[in-house]
Image (cartoon, helix red, strand yellow):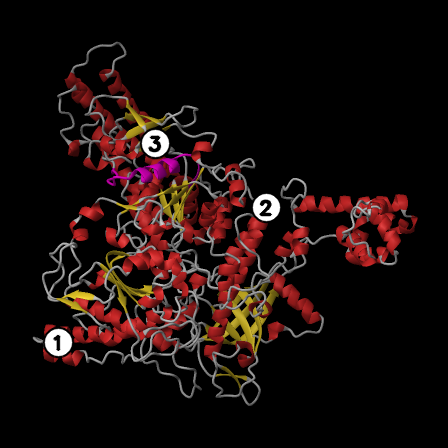
């Protein structure tokens, strides 16, 4: 590492980054100065001095020339080059080594040709091999203690250059992906259970969904290297597997797409048939893993041996179960392997016997690494105003709009304010001047001029100018949609900052309307700068869809909206905002508009087929419509100031027939009013032809692909994608000529540093400059960071730090939203201490749902102490798979009680801090009530980490641990856990343990002010009629422990079902509390609760069937007990941090 940074590509004098060319020139100047010195002063080295540079600048050549020299000679040369002090200065500088070994190494290492970092990076294979995957020094295990030093790069606050920044991120991203690949390989291969047969071949004792034994493997093409390269330009191979598996698994294999990454594995198992696989022992010796190589799918071969292309045509049905895939191998890796084979080592390409695939969501590491590598090979042009801030230097507030050279003093805030009183309340401390005194004219929209911006004027002053937007037509649907949210002063400051050029950081605590602010910023930029294009980036599809649903509700023309990626299927709108959805919209809209043109033509009685294409419509507008309108204008607005009769406006209007369905148009009360109606009618007609002119390109471009590219590059003004899609598709977007001026990032504190940086560079620079004008980041660094599954990378390398968090730590100015509108004020107190000045919006104090008590409960939130059950608290059936049966039973009993008194199931969510407990709670629900029509399942049972960004009315939270606090010690996890509930939060935990945890003191001090035994109000049905601050009228039952609660719910349940006793007793057998079996969890368990290697689906049948049993020898064709329904997984998706599925 010292050698690496000693030769880092940065100028030692100025600190400027150096390119590969600069470094080469520097090297040549050093070696030629050495040759000149040798020529002038040291005749013994004449051969060295006269040799050409390329022949003497390697370590071997330099050692040949300088090796035989004595210490004194070496010192003379070093002194002449000013590398060591002269003999007369020796007394003053006594720390310098002058021994022969040091002097020789000094001269050689200073003058040898360095390997270019970029060349080394370009020759590096992107797929990990077995040497890296199981190397504990490179990829430490999940259970990193936090002590000691590791040979890993770190991400902290500052970086030397953009090259250094990208390189560290590249290395860490690669290693984190390698760790996940290791888990997948160990899981799949251990399920296959390879054994050594008597004849020495491999016998497969089990089966795996994600891996299949290979029948045959052959390299079919090794293409010649490109000019100047040593590696082959392409290596292709054919892999054949036998897919005699269940139909749904077979279809998953057959649906492997182009560019999906798979792994080729060779195992030579040492154990005989029947040996049980032990998950606690090391993996490699048990299965005899020999080699691992990555490959990329090109496609499946048809019966003629040709690749089946993805396309609109249905895929051919292939006979039998054998399937052959054409794959691309890594060219760099193939070259290295062939060099090793030539030196007498085994040929790894002759012994592969397993093909493993991965879940598409987790499998785009290669594309992201290629994108980072590509960025390092191109000249990264970051906007000047951002460059130093991203590297962590200079004034952190330099990119704030108040310090930018070109702030806009006058801005159109459009519909941001509800009325003038709302505007005044949003600018406390400002001296407000109004351009009109007429209260009737003081209605939105408003244009604001800030006196304190761009001038040296002291004091805050503001000039308000209301204006009237011209009507768009005579119909009701022409009225623009208006914002209805009364924004708070801090929200308005965030909107103002977002509209100005520069960097805007908005910190949004839970429930403070981050999405509403984002949508208003987008809308205001759209109206203020109609020619600028805005890119929206979020962490998850869910957040992107929420954003889009709100954008659609504002006054933004939907032809300018575009959603890239695979998440638009979940959009809860009838419209399709994907690329092809928008193309279809434009084509349909074109036909509708041409129908309008035909209607207009018929109303004017013009002959000919003018509504055939956009072009003919354009001629019709130019020669027929404009001439009529200009003639009409000359009548109603004569040049000489003549008085025109009010009837003229009506009688001479040329488009009466066309607007027959909007009659009566003219009220004949005021000349100006009628004229405005006539002009709005013309605007309506003009807009039709303007849109048709924009759609002309879609007539000229014939293919869907060309049309969708045109839409992306020219037509769309607001383009949305997830950070993953941006990382995957950067090359494609840049080649297409994609351009944008503004970026808005939602959930910015949950996006990895590198995935936040890549969207800045999705376009080519113009004349050496980046055209980006605004960067708005909205997030909350007090909630959970990006999910990093390996603890060493997460903690030691600080990889979980998002760019948003780093900028906040650097001191970049932020706008902190300070009004929450999600939770009851009492529940908000559990986490508001973590934020500056977080208050409550009026509605959470005044609306009836917030003032009404939670039916059946003594309190709206409570910490419930749960003691050991049968002497057991937390249990750990397998490492890091924590469970607590008492808490699981208690949670489910409270859920059943809530359902029995009338709470809707969709308003209740059960959360926990560990994956093990999540599985246990689901098992208890399945045992107790899942199939009971009176009770059923809650809305969700999941981990706190996966529920970030979501909310529900009532949350039951199980904290699981009884021996140590565990990872709830991270306050960010506590903030997320406490802020998911709107109306009721019930926390089940070992109070004695958590109340003594220093980090959690503020929340647990507040929780323990109330009794720690659950208080129930008996005989109160949902919804309650009493107020939250009222004492309950009915009997209050203080629940002593879990068994007390379970027995109470049982008797309560029996009362409820007396009428249908026979039916229900047969349908749902009641078992004693604590009878639910605690199962040992096989296979892999992550330390991180944001990761769960199995699905987060409520349907647990999948897990039960897919491999809870250990592999056993296959005697007959296995018959499956149940048919498993697999979710349709999105393709090209990455890093699943929650219920929210991540894009592309």
Question: In the image shown, does 657 or 559 lie closer to the viewer?
Answer: 559
The quarter in which the N terminus is drawn is: bottom right
**Corner quadrant of residue 971:** bottom left
Horizontal arrangement in the rendering, residue 1100 relative to residue 760 (left or right): left
The quarter in which the C terminus is drawn is: bottom left
Residue occupying image coordinates x 25% and y 45%: 841
Say whether residue 936 is visible. no
Question: Which numbered circle lies on residue 618?
Answer: 3
Horizontal arrangement in the rendering, residue 271 relative to residue 228 (left or right): left
Q: Residue 264: x, y in percent?
A: 54, 71
Given the current orientation, which residue lies at the most extreme bottom position?
198
**Residue at mark 2:** 161
Question: Which numbered circle lies on residue 1054?
Answer: 1
In the depicted structure, whether residue 1111 falls above or below residue 982:
below
How many residues crowd around disc 3 within 10 Å: few (fewer than 14), some, or many (20 or more)? many
* Cα separation between marks 1 and 2: 70 Å
In the depicted structure, whether residue 517 falls above or below residue 984:
above
- Was residue 485 drawn as part of the magenta stretch in this picture? yes
In the depicted structure, whether residue 380 falls above or below residue 1086:
above
- Was residue 1073 drawn as part of the magenta stretch in this picture? no
Question: Which numbered circle lies on residue 740?
Answer: none
Q: Residue 361: x, y in percent?
A: 42, 61
Given the current orientation, which residue lies at the most extreme left position?
1059
Pointers 1 and 3 in contact (CB under 8 A)? no
In front of the other: label 1 or label 2? 1
In the depicted structure, whether residue 607 falls above or below residue 148:
above
- Of callouts 1 and 2, the N-terminal one: 2
Residue extent of the magenta highlight: 481-504
* Cα separation between marks 3 and 2: 53 Å
Residue occupying image coordinates x 16% and y 22%: 650
Question: In the image shown, does 833 or 210 lie closer to the viewer?
Answer: 833
């Amino acid at each position: 590492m010292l050698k690496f940074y000693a030769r880092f590509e940065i100028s030692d004098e100025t600190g400027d980054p150096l390119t590969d060319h600069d470094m080469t020139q520097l090297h040549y100047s050093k070696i030629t100065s050495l040759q000149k010195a040798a020529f002038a002063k040291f005749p013994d080295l004449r051969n060295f001095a006269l040799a050409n540079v390329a022949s003497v600048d390697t370590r071997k050549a330099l050692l040949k020339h300088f090796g035989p020299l004595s210490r004194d000679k070496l010192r003379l040369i070093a002194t002449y080059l000013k590398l060591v002090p002269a003999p007369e200065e020796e007394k003053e500088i006594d720390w310098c080594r002058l021994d022969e070994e040091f002097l020789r190494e000094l001269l050689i290492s200073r003058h040898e040709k360095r390997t270019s970092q970029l060349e080394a990076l370009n020759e590096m294979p992107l797929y990990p091999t077995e040497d890296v995957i199981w190397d504990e020094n490179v990829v430490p295990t999940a259970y990193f203690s936090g002590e000691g030093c590791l040979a890993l790069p770190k991400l902290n606050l500052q970086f030397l250059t953009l090259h250094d920044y990208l390189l560290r991120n590249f290395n860490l991203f690669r290693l984190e992906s390698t760790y996940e690949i290791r888990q997948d390989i160990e899981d799949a291969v251990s399920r296959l259970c390879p054994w050594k047969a008597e004849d020495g071949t491999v016998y497969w004792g089990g089966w795996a969904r994600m891996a299949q034994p290979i029948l045959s493997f052959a390299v079919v093409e090794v293409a010649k290297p490109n000019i100047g390269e040593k590696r082959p330009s392409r290596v292709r191979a054919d892999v054949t597997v036998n897919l005699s598996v269940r139909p749904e698994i077979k279809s998953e294999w057959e649906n492997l797409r182009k560019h999906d990454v798979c792994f080729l594995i060779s195992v030579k198992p040492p154990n005989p048939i029947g040996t049980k696989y032990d998950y606690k022992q090391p993996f490699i010796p048990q299965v005899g893993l020999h080699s691992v190589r990555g490959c990329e799918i090109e496609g499946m071969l048809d019966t003629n041996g040709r690749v089946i292309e993805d396309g609109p045509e249905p895929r051919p049905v292939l006979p039998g179960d054998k399937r052959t895939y054409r794959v691309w191998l890594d060219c760099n890796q193939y070259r290295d392997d062939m060099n090793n084979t030539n030196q007498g080592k085994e040929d790894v390409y002759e012994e592969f016997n397993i093909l493993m695939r991965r879940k598409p969501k987790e499998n785009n590491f290669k594309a992201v690494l290629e994108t980072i590598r590509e960025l390092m090979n191109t000249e990264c042009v970051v906007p000047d105003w951002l460059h130093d801030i991203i590297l962590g230097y200079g004034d952190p507030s330099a990119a704030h709009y108040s310090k930018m050279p070109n702030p806009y003093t006058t801005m159109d805030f459009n519909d941001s304010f509800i009325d003038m009183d709302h505007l005044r309340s949003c600018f406390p401390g400002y001296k407000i001047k109004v351009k009109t005194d007429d209260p009737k004219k003081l209605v939105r929209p408003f244009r604001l001029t800030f006196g304190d911006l761009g001038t040296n004027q002291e004091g805050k002053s503001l000039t308000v100018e209301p204006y009237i937007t011209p009507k768009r037509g005579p119909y009701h649907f022409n009225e623009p949609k208006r914002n209805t949210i009364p924004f708070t002063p801090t929200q308005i400051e965030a909107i103002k900052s977002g509209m100005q050029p520069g960097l805007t950081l908005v910190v949004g605590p839970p429930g403070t309307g981050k999405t509403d602010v984002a949508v208003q910023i987008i809308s205001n930029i759209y109206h203020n700068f109609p020619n600028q294009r805005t890119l929206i980036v979020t962490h998850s599809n869910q957040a992107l869809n929420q954003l889009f649903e709100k954008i659609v509700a504002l006054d933004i023309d939907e032809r300018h909206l575009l959603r890239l990626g695979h998440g638009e299927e979940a959009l809860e709108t009838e419209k399709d905002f994907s690329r092809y959805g928008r193309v279809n919209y434009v084509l349909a809209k074109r036909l509708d508009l041409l129908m309008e043109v035909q209607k207009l033509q018929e109303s004017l009685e013009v002959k000919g087929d003018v509504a055939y294409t956009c072009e003919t419509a354009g001629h019709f507008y130019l020669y027929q419509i404009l001439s009529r309108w200009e003639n009409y204008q000359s009548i109603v607005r004569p040049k000489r100031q003549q008085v025109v009769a009010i009837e003229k406006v009506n009688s001479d209007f040329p488009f009466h027939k066309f607007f027959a369905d909007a009659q009566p148009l003219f009220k004949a009360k005021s000349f100006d009013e009628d004229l405005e109606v006539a002009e709005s009618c013309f605007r309506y007609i003009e807009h039709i032809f303007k849109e048709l002119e924009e759609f002309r390109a879609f007539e000229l471009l014939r293919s869907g692909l060309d049309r969708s590219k045109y839409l992306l590059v020219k037509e769309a003004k607001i383009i949305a994608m997830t950070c993953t899609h941006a990382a995957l598709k950067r090359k494609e977007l840049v080649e297409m000529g994609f351009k944008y001026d503004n970026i808005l990032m939602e959930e910015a504190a949950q996006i990895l540093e590198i995935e936040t940086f890549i969207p800045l560079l999705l376009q080519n620079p113009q004349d050496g400059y980046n055209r980006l004008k605004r960067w708005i980041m909205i997030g909350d660094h007090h909630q959970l960071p990006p999910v990093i599954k390996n603890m060493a990378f997460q903690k030691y390398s600080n990889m979980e730090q998002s760019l948003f968090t780093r900028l906040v730590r650097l001191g970049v100015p932020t706008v902190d939203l300070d009004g929450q509108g999600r939770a009851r004020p009492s529940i908000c107190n559990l986490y508001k201490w973590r934020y500056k000045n977080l208050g409550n919006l009026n509605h959470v104090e005044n609306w009836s749902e917030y003032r009404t008590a939670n039916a059946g409960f003594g309190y709206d939130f409570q910490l419930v102490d749960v003691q050991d059950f049968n002497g057991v608290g937390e249990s750990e059936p397998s490492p890091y798979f924590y469970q607590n049966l008492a808490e699981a039973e208690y949670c489910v009993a409270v859920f059943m009680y809530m359902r029995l008194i009338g709470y809707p199931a969709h308003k209740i969510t059960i959360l926990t801090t560990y994956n093990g407990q999540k599985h246990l709670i689901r098992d208890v629900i399945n045992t107790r009530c899942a199939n009971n029509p009176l009770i059923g399942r809650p809305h969700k049972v999941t981990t706190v980490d996966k529920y970030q960004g979501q909310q529900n009315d009532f949350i039951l939270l199980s904290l699981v641990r009884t021996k140590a606090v565990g990872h709830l010690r991270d306050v960010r996890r506590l903030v997320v856990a406490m802020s998911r509930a709107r109306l009721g939060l019930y926390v089940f935990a070992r109070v004695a343990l958590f109340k003594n945890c220093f980090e959690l003191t503020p929340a647990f001090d507040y929780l323990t002010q109330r009794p720690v035994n659950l208080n129930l109000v008996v005989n109160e049905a949902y919804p309650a009629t009493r107020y939250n601050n009222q004492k309950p009228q009915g009997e209050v039952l203080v629940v002593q422990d879990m068994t007390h609660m379970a027995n109470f719910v049982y008797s309560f349940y029996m009362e409820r079902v007396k009428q249908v006793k026979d039916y229900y007793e047969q349908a749902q057998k009641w078992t004693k509390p604590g009878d639910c079996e605690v199962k040992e969890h096989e296979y892999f368990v992550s330390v991180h609760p944001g990761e769960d290697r199995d699905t987060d689906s409520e349907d647990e049948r999948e897990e039960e069937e897919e491999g809870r049993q250990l592999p056993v020898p296959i005697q007959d064709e296995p018959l499956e007990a149940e048919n498993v329904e697999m979710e349709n997984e999105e393709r090209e998706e990455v890093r699943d941090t929650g219920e929210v599925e991540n894009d592309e």
